[in-house]
Image (spheres, rainbow, N blue to C red):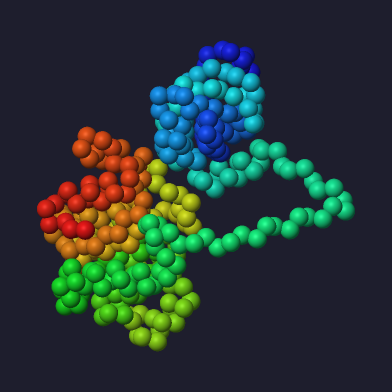
């Protein structure tokens, strides 16, 4: 139904587009049932919750409910100037579904007039590496080797790490960290839900073949600790039925290692403490909205430094 400008009302739907400006956060939402009616939510900066904080809490695919006052027409459809926006369900739609819906609903650009050449793209300078970038520099194998060396020192050498089922490389991706361990004579198993789990890049595969480290590496496509509601679904194979990691594999391992494991970071630390296993974890992202119960000094854990402190306080023997 068409809303009258100035009337109080509410709006619920799936977020398919979001924009943040200095004065407001804009959300484009579609009705879940029809999937065709697109309306706008405008959340001004002047509200009690800053728009930037709401931006961090609302993602594509979220089912949201907003309350406010209907205003003039927005970018696409009618606009609700919201006083409050709550997330009813996280990632109800996949990111790919949101992008497909958005491209079908939003008006395409005007066709270029015949005879007008396409402008050449401006030259873009390569982005310099920032020392504070938690994801490190471009040499990912070198970074994996540093983490492998650290695990060897923490656990006490190859003899200990090769006990049981060996090392579990949580969220190991293509397996560069497991390769770094295998090059040092340590057995490692990659646990990752992506289809690319254990699929080394071409140069790394060549190194694996030349070194003969292949037999020390294994891969298990699984969720470590199970899949979380609202977790990232933009990777290849996110819609596949992927099981949780076998508990026997975890209980029999010699140590746990995780280089940027995203949502699984705390689960790795908890499992290592529960099973009294050595571990090395390199956190990168906090995912504060997925873990609202994390607190530090009475406040929610929102920054990387707070997250590291939160993990350290889990046990007196945890060091950074």
Against 310, residue 280 (above or below) is below
Against 48, residue 36 (above or below) is below
How many numbered badges does the structure rendering display? 0
Against 79, residue 229 (above or below) is below
Task: Residue 67 in the image: state x and y as whole percent.
Answer: 48, 20
Question: Quick check: 197 left or right of 151?
Answer: right
Task: Residue 182 in the image: state x and y as whole percent.
Answer: 30, 77
In the displayed orientation, state which residue is furthest to the right.
115
The residue shown at (26%, 40%) is 294
The residue shown at (35%, 85%) is 212
Instruction: Pick the quarter of the image with the C terminus.
Output: bottom left
Tell me, yes or no, if residue 226 can be seen here: no
Task: Residue 282 in the image: state x and y as whole percent.
Answer: 30, 59
Q: Quadrant of residue 75?
A: top right
Question: Quick check: 198 left or right of 165?
Answer: right
Q: Nearer the viewer, residue 94 or 292?
A: 292
Q: Nearer the viewer, residue 34 or 150?
A: 150
Q: Quadrant of residue 189?
A: bottom left
Question: Quick check: 154 left or right of 245?
Answer: left
Task: Residue 268 in the image: state x and y as whole percent.
Answer: 25, 56
The residue shown at (48%, 28%) is 45
In the displayed orientation, state which residue is furthest to the left.
316
Tell me, yes or no, if residue 242 can be seen here: yes
The residue shown at (52%, 34%) is 22
Q: Quadrant of residue 166?
A: bottom left
Instruction: Pick the quarter of the image with the N terminus.
Output: top right
Against 174, residue 135 (above or below) is above
């Amino acid at each position: 139904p068409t809303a009258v400008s100035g009337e109080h009302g509410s709006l619920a739907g799936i977020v398919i587009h979001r924009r943040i400006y200095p004065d407001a956060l804009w959300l484009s939402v579609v009705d879940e049932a029809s999937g065709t009616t697109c309306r706008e939510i405008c959340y001004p900066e002047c509200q009690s919750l800053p728009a930037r904080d709401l931006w961090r809490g609302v993602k594509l695919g979220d089912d949201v409910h907003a309350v406010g006052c209907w205003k003039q027409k927005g970018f696409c459809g009618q606009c609700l100037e919201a006083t409050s926006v709550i997330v009813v369900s996280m990632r109800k739609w996949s990111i790919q579904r949101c992008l497909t819906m958005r491209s079908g609903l939003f008006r395409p650009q005007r066709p270029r007039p015949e005879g007008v050449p396409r402008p050449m793209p401006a030259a873009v300078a390569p982005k310099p590496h920032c020392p504070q970038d938690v994801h490190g520099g471009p040499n990912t194998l070198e970074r994996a080797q540093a983490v492998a060396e650290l695990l060897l020192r923490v656990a006490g050498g190859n003899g200990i790490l090769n006990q049981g089922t060996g090392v579990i490389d949580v969220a190991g991706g293509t397996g560069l960290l497991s390769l770094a361990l295998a090059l040092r004579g340590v057995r490692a198993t990659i646990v990752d839900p992506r289809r690319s789990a254990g699929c080394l890049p071409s140069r790394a595969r060549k190194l694996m073949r030349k070194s003969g480290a292949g037999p020390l590496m294994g891969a298990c496509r699984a969720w470590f600790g199970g899949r979380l509601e609202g977790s990232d679904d933009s990777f290849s194979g996110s819609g596949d039925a992927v099981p949780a990691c076998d508990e026997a594999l975890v209980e029999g391992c010699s140590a746990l290692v995780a280089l940027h494991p995203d949502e699984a970071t705390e689960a790795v630390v908890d499992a290592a403490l529960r099973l009294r296993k050595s571990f090395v974890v390199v956190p990168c992202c906090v995912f504060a909205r997925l873990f609202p119960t994390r607190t530090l000094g009475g406040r929610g854990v929102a920054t990387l430094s707070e997250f590291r402190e939160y993990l350290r306080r889990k046990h007196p023997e945890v060091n950074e």
